[in-house]
Amino acid sequence: MKIFIYLFFLLLPGFCQADTFILKDGARIEGEVTGEMDGVLLVKTKYGSLTINRADIQEQQAALAPAIISPAALIELSSAQPAAVAASTAAPAVEISTALPEAVIASTAAPAVGISTALPEEVVAPAPKLTFRTIIPSTMTRQLVYLEGGVAVATETFDAGGALVLTEGAISNGTYTEYYPDGSLKTVKTMMSGKANGTLKAFYPAGALQVEAYYLAGGREGPFKYYTGDGKLLMEAAYRNDLLNGWKKEYGADGAVTSATYYIDDRPAEPRKEPTAPGQGKQTAAEPESMVTAKVVRLARGELLSFRLNGKYIGKAHLDKGFNLISQEGKIPDGAVKIYTEDGKLLKELVFVKNALITLRAYDPGGLLKAEYYYIDNEAVKK
């Protein structure tokens, strides 16, 4: 019985329309060129459309054309034995003995080597390196391309105002790094659930810290600082829910403040009133003084605060030495709860909104503000 194998179907490779672009920074992007203008390529990938400057391309590997095999290349294989072999071309038969040799010369015999048939332990491949790169195709948009092991897996597109307008692909959890063309570190950030979380640091090409910011679920949360190349503070601001909340200050070359604006929810507002006398703390109209009183009990590793309203117990809070909120019970009305020493001096001020502690201010014995904290997931972050 004959078996027919048609190589036309077996050997024909799939048609590949995507070119492979190897960028100068080592990134590898696969996609189809859909247009080009002013030296900028528009490339359609399975993770979205990207723009690539032709000057950034180290090598472009063209798409493979489909292989064409003529019908003459079809090969017929027969399972039947050949009827005869031409004598003129046949090689003389060679008889091969299957008998074992009578002896092995000891002096030349190789020592027996034991070969284990046990399977090797599972080899765990190292996790692919997580990187990203910034592409600015125009003054209206900015794109971040995320790569795993040098292969693009996702993109983020931002508008001119910095707002995220589109995410394509899946961004794995982990710490991502961005590098300058010369290989020096540019940016380090952590992504969780597809969004920036934790500290973000950006560096100048020479290695000095340029920006230090904090993110929570993709939004800025906490202090934001911008430095000059020689390490001097150039600008600092405070964010909450990705909005300016607090002072935004700019500094001159001599370190002096050149401008200072107070913000509430991204809008300029009246700053907190400075204390006019010892014992009087800073407070905004948005933080009315609460009618709640509080008593502090010192603990070995922090303090326990009990709250009362009109003499009636309503709740308590446990803070550690770093003012982190360990636990909270009861319901505390909105407002600023002030805590005084036995001699009547302001010691602390806690601001509650919707039964959540959002701000804590600590004062020195003279009544002046010593430190101020805001809270992220019950952790105290110093302003």
Image (tube, helix red, strand yellow):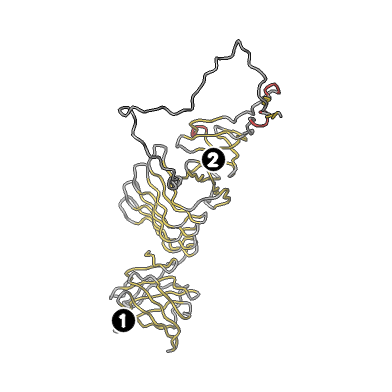
Residue extending farthest to the bottom is 311
Q: Quadrant of residue 284?
A: bottom left
Residue 350 location (% of width, % of height): 40, 75
* Residue under pointer 2: 137
How far is mark 1 from mark 2, CA to CA?
A: 60 Å
Q: How many marks?
A: 2
Relative horizontal placement of residue 246, taking residue 46 as reference (left or right): left
Q: Which kind of residue does numbered mark 2 sit on?
A: Pro
Q: Which kind of residue does numbered mark 1 sit on?
A: Thr
Q: Which mark is residue 117?
A: none
Q: Residues within 10 Å of mark 1 (few under 14, many from 20)?
A: few
Query: In the rendered image, which quarter contains the N terminus?
Result: top right
- Sequence-first disc among 1 and 2: 2
Residue 6 location (% of width, % of height): 68, 29
Query: Measuring 38% from the left and 76% from the top, which residue is drawn there?
Result: 318
Query: In front here: 315 or 1?
Result: 1
Q: Is residue 294 above or below residue 215?
A: below
Query: In front here: 3 or 354?
Result: 3
Residue 28 location (% of width, % of height): 50, 37
Relative horizontal placement of residue 316, taking residue 64 as reference (left or right): left
Q: Which mark is residue 341?
A: 1
Relative horizontal placement of residue 187, taking residue 160 as reference (left or right): left
Query: Measuring 48% from the left and 31% from the top, which residue is drawn there?
Result: 58
Q: Residues within 10 Å of mark 2 (few under 14, many from 20)?
A: some
Query: In the rendered image, which quarter contains the C terminus?
Result: bottom left
Query: In front here: 74 or 280?
Result: 74
Residue 367 location (% of width, % of height): 31, 75
Q: Is residue 314 above or below residue 100?
A: below
Query: Measuring 50% from the left and 23% from the top, which residue is drawn there?
Result: 96
Residue extending farthest to the top is 88
